[in-house]
């Protein structure tokens, strides 16, 4: 049954559809949105999780978004789901993972703003914020930096992000990230 339920040839625009779904889900419920749907992770202590889904092509198929994170990293997974009468099958399509130094709580607003700014405009910079984003927060002059591969696309990417306190001239947290499609798409 699984071979028929996940015949990816049935979804000719799957790659672009998943990318658009990513931006929509991040804006509605992802970490940058500060959604009330964000809950404690049921399996990983001190992590948070949020899920979101939409019908895709027909009522039997849906795109499913999972965003989960802790202090030093996290992951976003987008899957295709098939809803049968007595079961659901899930095929992971795309993933982004990030890990690294814990961000100081005082700089989380700039990270959230940098990501929200990129996601709301549907700009893909390795799944994170733009190359540079400046903000003053709590008297601190901060700059969010993203060094992503210019050849990276939604289908395959990697890079590093960090925040600098301009006044103290020091790095106050950062992550490396990577991701892309797990299945062949056009």
Image (spheres, rainbow, N blue to C red):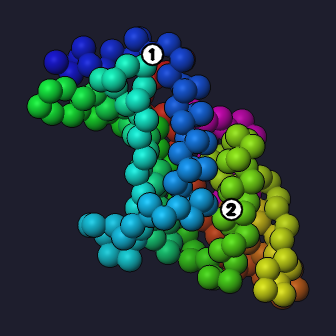
Image vertical order of residue 178 relative to residue 62, above or below: below
Please tell me which residue is depicted at 82% across the width and 59% down the height of the picture: 132
Q: Quadrant of residue 121?
A: top right
State which quarter of the image contains the N terminus.
top left
Q: Position of residue 105 (x, y in %)?
A: 62, 82
Image vertical order of residue 186 relative to residue 135, above or below: above
**Residue corresponding to mark 2:** 161
Please tell me which residue is depicted at 84% across the width and 87% down the height of the picture: 139
Mark 1 or 2, nearer chain start: 1
Q: Position of residue 61 (x, y in %)?
A: 34, 25
Residue 155 painted magenta = yes
Q: Is residue 82 left or right of residue 20?
A: left
Question: What label sits on residue 11 in the rendered view?
Answer: 1
Q: Position of residue 17 (x, y in %)?
A: 54, 27
Please tell me which residue is depicted at 82% across the width and 62% down the height of the picture: 133
Question: What label sits on residue 87 in the rendered view?
Answer: none
Image vertical order of residue 103 relative to residue 176, above or below: below
Nearer the observer, 57 or 180: 57
Please tell me which residue is depicted at 21% across the width and 22% down the height of the picture: 2
């Amino acid at each position: 049954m699984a071979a028929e339920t996940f015949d990816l040839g049935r979804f000719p625009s799957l790659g672009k559809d998943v990318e658009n779904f990513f931006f929509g889900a991040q804006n509605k419920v992802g970490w940058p949105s500060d959604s009330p749907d964000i809950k404690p992770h049921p399996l990983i202590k001190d992590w948070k999780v949020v899920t979101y889904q939409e019908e895709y092509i027909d009522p039997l198929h849906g795109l499913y978004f999972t965003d989960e994170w802790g202090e030093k990293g996290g992951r976003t997974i987008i899957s295709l789901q098939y809803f049968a009468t007595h079961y659901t099958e899930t095929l992971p399509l795309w993933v982004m993972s990030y890990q690294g130094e814990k961000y100081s709580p005082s700089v989380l607003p700039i990270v959230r703003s940098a990501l929200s700014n990129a996601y709301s405009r549907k700009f893909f910079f390795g799944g994170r914020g733009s190359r540079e984003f400046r903000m003053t927060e709590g008297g601190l002059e901060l700059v969010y930096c993203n060094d992503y591969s210019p050849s990276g696309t939604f289908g395959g990417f990697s890079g590093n992000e960090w925040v600098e306190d301009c006044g103290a001239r020091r790095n106050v947290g950062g992550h490396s990230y990577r991701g892309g499609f797990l299945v062949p798409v056009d």
